[in-house]
Image (cartoon, rainbow, N blue to C red):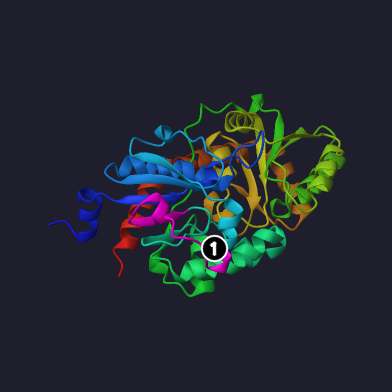
């Protein structure tokens, strides 16, 4: 006889209301954030594994939205709650926000991919991608910092369960908020299938991927590149890909543009980013802090060796298939670059191991993990 939770997934229709604001572009000519990519990926996977559930992508904004629900699955719809977004966010902080289920209809679960859940008569499951606002407050925009400091403790107190993207962040949440670890569920990022990797001899550049902001550590990457270039002028070009950030972003952009051998491309779409991964001799991703680190597995899937940080979620996601460095040491990053330029056996080993690690991260598996997390959360008293 199936358990109550098994019956819930197989026989019961559920209605999931999901905050889909992150699916929208962050600006003209730009795409969604990493949170948006997670949301799009797991919603597609969830739709596949829970075909009897109704998934409602809900966006609170006065402007009409243009999202095609069919690309996520036949049981996915879009609901635009026409309410001023800034006013709604302010009302959330003040505890005066209206119940969204009054506008979006009765639902069983409210999923909050953007860290925060909304008032309503449903089980609330926030998705807390990282705790950068606690561990690295200097790396978060002041307005967002104040908002997260006020909202997340409230969100945690009202959560039926919490979803996050790595074991590292799960442990941080459990410790910082004294939240039952059994009700924190890891739903990692996924990676779309990639074309066959190019061989090393067809790869021509080094690659950095990350928004122009302090946490991505571009300043030390540029310093490391200058150290390598001073020792070996034939070092390949460094291509820097990233959307506009904040707090010194303009200075970073000027520093990158003014560094010999560095080419900045700004924001590019996923298709062109995939091409760059395949053309790169290595990915430089020594962030100071990440909740997951999606470029790590994207590069690995493209057969590109990765240099990343020797701590936190980056080391966890890399799974022993990347070259780990101290992100606070430009010299250590530079030595890592030199090793991958010179050691062909190490490069081949990382390519093979990285491909196996990346194959474990799929959006289909992430969708199934989210389905299990929702079922376990609503099964709690």
Image quadrant containing the C terminus:
bottom left
The front one of 67 and 320 is 67
Give the left or right position of residue 368, taking residue 305 as reference: left
Q: Where is residue 76 shown, x and y percent of the image?
A: 37, 40
Q: Where is residue 265 shown, x and y percent of the image?
A: 73, 33
Residue appearing at x 60%, y 30% in the figure: 278
Residue appearing at x 58%, y 58% in the figure: 89
Q: Is residue 142 magenta?
A: no
The answer to which quarter of the image holds residue 162 is bottom left
Residue appearing at x 53%, y 39% in the figure: 64
Question: Is residue 360 in sight in this rendering?
Answer: no
Residue appearing at x 78%, y 52% in the figure: 330
Q: Which residue in the structure is indicated by mark 1?
A: 92
The answer to which quarter of the image holds residue 176 is bottom right
Q: Where is residue 224 shown, x and y percent of the image?
A: 79, 47
Q: Is residue 101 magenta?
A: yes
Q: Where is residue 276 shown, x and y percent of the image?
A: 64, 30
In the rendered image of this protein, does residue 187 appear above or below residue 44? below
Question: Is residue 188 in sight in this rendering?
Answer: yes
**Which stretch is magenta?**
93-112
Q: How many numbered marks does the figure carry?
A: 1
Q: Secondary structure at mark 1?
A: helix
The front one of 334 and 253 is 253
């Amino acid at each position: 006889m199936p358990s109550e939770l098994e019956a819930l997934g197989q026989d019961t229709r559920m209605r999931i209301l999901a905050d889909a604001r992150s699916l929208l572009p962050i600006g003209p000519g730009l795409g969604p954030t990493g949170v948006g990519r997670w949301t799009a990926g797991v919603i597609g996977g969830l739709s596949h594994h829970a075909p009897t559930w109704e998934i409602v992508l809900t966006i609170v904004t006065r402007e009409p939205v243009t999202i095609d629900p069919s690309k996520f699955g036949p049981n996915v719809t879009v609901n635009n709650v026409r309410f001023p977004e800034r006013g709604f966010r302010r009302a959330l902080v003040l505890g005066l926000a209206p119940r969204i289920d009054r506008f979006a209809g009765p639902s069983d679960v409210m999923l909050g991919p953007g860290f925060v859940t909304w008032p309503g008569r449903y089980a609330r499951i926030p998705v807390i991608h990282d705790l950068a606002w606690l561990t690295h407050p200097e790396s978060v925009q002041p307005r967002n910092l104040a908002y997260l400091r006020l909202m997340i403790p409230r969100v945690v107190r009202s959560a039926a369960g919490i979803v996050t993207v790595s074991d590292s962040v799960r442990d941080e949440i459990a410790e910082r908020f004294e939240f039952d670890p059994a009700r924190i569920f890891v739903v990692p990022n996924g990676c779309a299938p990639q074309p066959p990797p190019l061989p090393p001899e067809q790869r021509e550049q080094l690659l950095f991927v990350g928004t122009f902001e302090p946490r991505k550590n571009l300043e030390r990457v540029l310093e490391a590149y200058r150290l390598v270039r001073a020792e070996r002028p034939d070092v390949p070009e460094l291509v820097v890909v990233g959307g506009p950030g904040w707090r010194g972003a303009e200075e970073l952009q000027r520093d990158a543009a003014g560094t010999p051998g560095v080419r900045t491309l700004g924001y590019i779409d996923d298709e062109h980013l995939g091409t760059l991964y395949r053309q790169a001799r290595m990915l430089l991703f020594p962030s100071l802090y990440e909740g997951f680190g999606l470029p790590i597995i994207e590069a690995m899937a493209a057969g590109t060796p990765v240099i990343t940080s020797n701590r936190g979620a980056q080391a966890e996601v890399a799974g022993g298939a990347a070259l780990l460095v101290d992100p606070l040491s430009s010299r250590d990053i530079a030595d890592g670059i030199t090793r991958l330029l010179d050691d062909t056996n190490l490069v081949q080993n990382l390519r093979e191991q990285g491909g196996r690690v990346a194959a474990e991260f799929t959006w289909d598996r992430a969708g199934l993990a989210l389905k299990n997390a929702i079922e376990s959360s609503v099964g709690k008293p």
